[in-house]
Every structure is written in structure tokens, then in C-alpha cells.
Amino acid sequence: MTQKTTSVADAELDLVLEKSRDNIMITDGEGRILKAGSKCAVIYGREIDQMLGGSVYDLEREGVLKPSVSAQVLKTRRAVQLMQTTETGRTVMAEGFPLFDAQGALYRVISFSQDLTDLQLLQQEYELLQQKLQQRSVAHDAEVIQAQELTFKSAQLKELYALLQRVAPSDANLLMLGESGVGKTAFAQLAHHLSPRREGPFIEVNCSAIPENLFESEMFGYAPGSFTGASRQGKPGLIEQAHQGTLFLDEVGDLPLSMQVKLLKVLQDGKVTRIGSTEPRVLDFRLISATNQPLQQQVEAGHFRLDLYYRLNVVPVTIAPLRDRPEDIPLLLERVLERLNARYQQHKVLDSRARHQLIHYAWPGNVRELENVLERFYVASPGTVIHYEGPDPVPSVSGTAAAPSLASGQPASVLESGDFSSLPEALDAFEKQLLQQALKRCSTTYELADYLGISQPTVFRRLRKHGLQVRKD
Ligand SMILES: Nc1ncnc2c1ncn2[C@@H]1O[C@H](COP(=O)(O)OP(=O)(O)OP(=O)(O)O)[C@@H](O)[C@H]1O
């Protein structure tokens, strides 16, 4: 160890610095480096002896700390998380925390940096692959792809399918992005099916549905008799159940920060320790996450950890909304109709007007909304031919006169009277009105989800956002 130890506390601290997986650096209130871990040399290309006693501002000027997280903490007096590119060309995630004395003076900054270069290289490799695939025509334009339960012919989804085929054999983490109902879960299942882990389990976790106080026991499991009410045999957590298969974290953007920290640790260590046990279990699973939230913005707003975002987002897989790939709509109608006929043991067909209306609708709730609307048409049509006699085009899923179709171009009553300064504000008001109307018909979040053609967690989130509540749940 390079640093001199003067006391037991110092010796302990030096050991932490030496053994930590992150590089740790401690500066005083002026940005002078008091201590640094041995990983400094590897990450920043400077030996500890060259760093100690030096100023982070000088190192920033010299381009060693680009930028210095400690300097940012000293400036803002708050915890800061940022990305650095080092002189040695490495990509580093750094996090700095201020320490204040009793008088409120900032006397220390402790920073932790983690080398993410390998993860980044993997990302670049896949970006290159994606570009190559986009240049090459993946399949003949007219060709319809039928993969598992999925049907599509749009160029966007064919490219996505080719990407999934290419990355499936590897264990690279996938992040499925797209609006609610576009097929993130369905494509995650496809990725699992294409992978060598297809015989293993596919464990789906809806991150917004697990209450914060149950997160650890649900995710990590517990040992026999570890707390009151725990089952006698103990229980494996969801992560453990995904061993040798795929762990799918849906709505990952909804994970509270405290859970993000715990999840990150498991991903870094590849091990899970059940609550009440001291025995870590080494686990082998492939991680796929999904969100319909702008995760990058969540990171910028401090609601999502940058390091976790990096880990989840190795291969971003964006699924286009249905309105941007209308060529998939006729196919989906056929497919969903087939499924309905099989389920209801009938042979119904769509008449040309209903078909025309469905094909020309904007589908804000994407494929899930299409499934729900078609099923409503289906059950409402007594004969073998499915008719729709309503206004042209089809009404929106709210189905009320006061809430017109997005496709019809009619303003909603709330918008007619409202004085809005921005589009987001107007959309918010519109969304609230739709929810209030839907609440008159539905008494649970599950009914609402079905009625509006969105997922239950999305319903839950939107109601919370507008301060609305269902009658029971
Ligand atoms: N290309 C497709 N072909 C056939 N069915 C599809 C296709 N894409 C999506 N679906 C179906 O649409 C429905 C909604 O898909 P899914 O649940 O995967 O959406 P999601 O993006 O995960 O939604 P959320 O964000 O609300 O959880 C599912 O029943 C799925 O099987």
C-alpha cells in the first residue's frame, strides 16, 4: 500500500480503498486529494503518489479528470453523478458526495469511480451491428414474419427481429423501449425463445407492482424462519427463479431509487443472498428490462441511477408505435381475429367498413388497444360478419361522445374550453378527462386497463399522477 497508515482507523480506511471494486478518492474542502485507491493508476493513468496532495482542479485542467466529480460537488454542494472520459480513453462513471461539519462547511468530498469501458465497448459493437443490419435488406419487403405469437411485415420490426436474432446467443442485457402496448413484453419473450436459454425459465417481474417493503423478499427470497410470517421452508426470490433463464424486469423506470441500488448490486456481483441467510448463491441469468418512460430523462432528473441505466441499456431495442408502421395493422387484425375465432369457436369475418375503420385508426394504445377494440367489435356483432355502424373512423377506446377519437381530429370538451400554454399541458388535461370518464364505467385498475387498452401498471401510474382513484381494488 502506498499511503502511510497512522492509526487503526487509517489502516481500516486504506484497506477499504485498496479492496473496493470502485476507485475511491477523498479530497478536502479545497479539492486537494487526501487519499485515493490503487485503481487510480488503471483508471486515470496516474500513480497514487502523483495524485496525493494534488488538486482536482489541476488534474481537470490537465485532462486527467474529465470532468472532476469532486470539483462539481464542491461547486454545487450536492451529490453528483457524471460520466468521465479519461486520458487513457476509458469511460468512467463517477459519483461524489459532500461531507459537512457542524457549522455547515463542506470539509470533504468522497468520490467513487467505476470503469464502464467494457460495457461501452459491448454497446458500440451492437450499435455497429445495428447499422450494418439497417443497411442490408433484412427480408424481402412483402414478406410477413411469423415468429412465435408475433406477426409483422414492417421494415422497423424486421430490423428489430434481425437484431434480436443476432444478439440472442449472447448474454448482453437488452432494454426494450416503446410506448405502452407496442409489444415490449412479447418481444422480450421472443428474445428469450431465440436464445440458448429457451429451455430455462422466463421470469417476468412487474417492477411497478411490487410494494417497496416487499421488494427484497420477493426479489431475493428468504431463508427458513427468517421473519415472522415467513414460510418454514423459506422461498427463492424471483431473481433466483430466473437461474439459467431470463429475468424480465418490466416497467423498470418505476423502480424507486432505494431498490435500484439493491438491484445494481446483484447485477454487479452476479450473486443473491436470501434474507436471513449468509450464503450467497451464484446465479446465471440473462437480463431484459423494459420501460415506456424516457429513462435518459429520468437519469438527468436524478430519478434513475446512471450506473444502473448503463448496465441495463447495453442493447437498446426500440419498438415503433403502431401508427408509424401501419402496414402491420391488417396483419394484426387477421391474427387477432384468428385467435378470437379459436377462443369463441366461431368463424367470424370483418366487413369492409369495419376493417377500413380499424386500419385507419391511430391506435394510441398500440397492439393491446387493437386487441381490445377488435374483441369488443367481435362480441358485439351477433352474426358471422363483424359490422361497425358508428361514426367514421372508430371512436377512441373511451367510447363516449365527449371524448372523441384521436383520429377524428375533434377536440375534447376540456380542450375546447381550456386555456393551455403548452401541448403537454393540454395532453395532460385530456388524459385526466379520459380517465375520469373511464372511472365512471370501471371500478378496478384491471378493468380500466382493459377498457383503455393500456397495462394495469400504466393505469396505476396515470391515476396517481392526476390524483384520481378507483372505487375499489
Ligand atoms: N407483432 C405482434 N404480433 C402479434 N401480437 C402482438 C404483436 N405485438 C404485440 N402483440 C400483442 O399485443 C399485446 C401487448 O403487447 P405487450 O404486452 O408485449 O406490450 P408492452 O409494450 O409490454 O406493454 P406495456 O408497456 O403496457 O407493458 C400482447 O397481447 C402481445 O402479444
Image: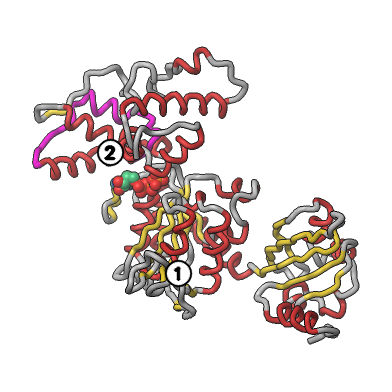
Query: From what the image shows, is residue 129 above or below residue 383?
Result: below
Label 2 within 8 A of ligand 1 by Cβ: yes
User: Looking at the image, which residue is at 70% across and 57% down?
Assistant: 81
* Magenta extent: 345-367
Label 1: how many residues lie within 10 Å, few (<14), some (14-19) or many (20+)? Answer: some
Residue type marked 2:
Glu
**Which residue is farthest top?**
417
Answer whether residue 374 is visible to the viewer in this image.
Answer: yes
Q: Earlier in the sequence, mark 2 or mark 1?
A: 1
User: Looking at the image, which residue is at 44% across and 78% down?
Assistant: 281
Answer whether residue 155 is visible to the viewer in this image.
Answer: no
Query: From what the image shows, is residue 426 above or below residue 196?
Result: above
Residue type marked 1:
Asp
Q: Quadrant of residue 116?
A: bottom right
Residue 77: where, in percent of width, then height?
Answer: 80, 53
State the residue position of label 2.
371
Label 1 within 8 A of ligand 1 by Cβ: no
Residue 347: where, in percent of width, then height?
Answer: 10, 37
How many numbered circles does the render carry?
A: 2
Choose between 50 and 430: the one closer to the eye. 430
Mark 1: secondary structure:
loop
Numbered mark located on residue 351 in the image = none
Q: Quadrant of residue 426?
A: top right
Choose between 338 and 309: the one closer to the eye. 309
CA separation in Å, label 2 and label 1: 32 Å
Looking at the rendered image, the quarter that the C terminus falls into is: top left
**Which residue is farthest front?**
228
Residue 65: where, in percent of width, then height?
Answer: 80, 65
State the residue position of label 1.
171
User: Disc 2, disc 1: CB below 8 Å?
Assistant: no
Q: Is residue 8 magenta?
A: no
Residue 269: where, in percent of width, then height?
Answer: 54, 74
